[in-house]
Amino acid sequence: MTTDTITIEGMLREDGVTLQLREKVDLPPGRVTVTVQAAQPMQTGNEPAMVEVLERILREQRSRGRMPITEEQMAAEISAIRADEDDYEKRCKQIWARTGPQSTES
């Protein structure tokens, strides 16, 4: 029995179980052993890191006069969203209550 070893890059999904491979595995169907090793972020050397990009975006937005919202504004926005969700849930419950079992007597 021959043991084929193939190295392929992929992405481990949030569930911690699912792997998405970059390319098709050229092995016959059957049991396999998988060894997982964290890969270095893909950078070509001339690309800025994500933090640098985010900092640049923030600087550019501020230079154009756009300021991030305050904590108070964020809290108000969250409260408004929650109120909308509560109203939606109440309306759904009202509709559901009207669709209960109907009497079959004539």
Image (spheres, helix red, strand yellow):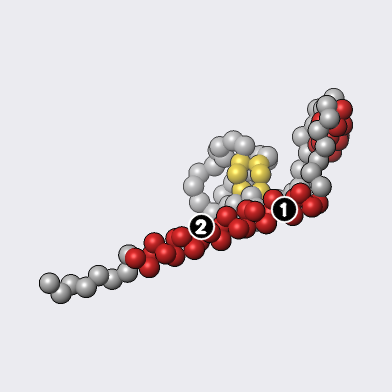
> Which percent across, then down, holds residue 104?
18, 72
Q: Residue at x 69, y 50 (%)?
A: 77
The answer to whether residue 31 is left or right of residue 8 is: left
According to the picture, the residue beneath numbered tag 2 turns out to be 88
Using residue 65 as the reference point, say whether residue 90 is left or right of it: left
| Residue 7 or residue 18, whichever sits in front | 18
- Residue type indicated by callout 2: Tyr
Q: Is residue 66 visible?
A: yes
Which residue occupies the foreground of this view, 43 or 62?
Answer: 62
Q: Secondary structure at mark 2?
A: helix
Residue 53 location, x and y as percent? 82, 32
Residue topped by disc 1: 76
Q: Residue at x 38, y 64 (%)?
A: 96
Judging depth in this view, the residue of 55 and 81 nearest the camera is 81
Identified by mark 1, the residue type is Ala
Q: Tell me how far mark 2 sits from mark 1, CA to CA.
A: 18 Å
Residue that protrudes farthest toward the left in the picture? 106
Rate crowding at label 2 as few (under 14), some (14 to 19) or many (20 or more) other CA atoms within 10 Å: few
Query: Total marks drawn?
Result: 2
Determine whether the residue tagged by mark 1 lies in a helix, strand or loop.
Answer: helix
Residue 98, numbered label: none
Cβ atoms at labels 2 and 1 below 8 Å apart:
no
Q: Position of residue 88 (x, y in %)?
A: 51, 57
Image position of 20 with respect to 91: above or below:
above
Q: Is residue 60 visible?
A: no
Task: Provide residue 47's location: percent of width, then percent of height.
Answer: 82, 27
Tell me which residue sits at (87%, 27%) in the image.
63
Quarter of the C terminus within the rendering: bottom left
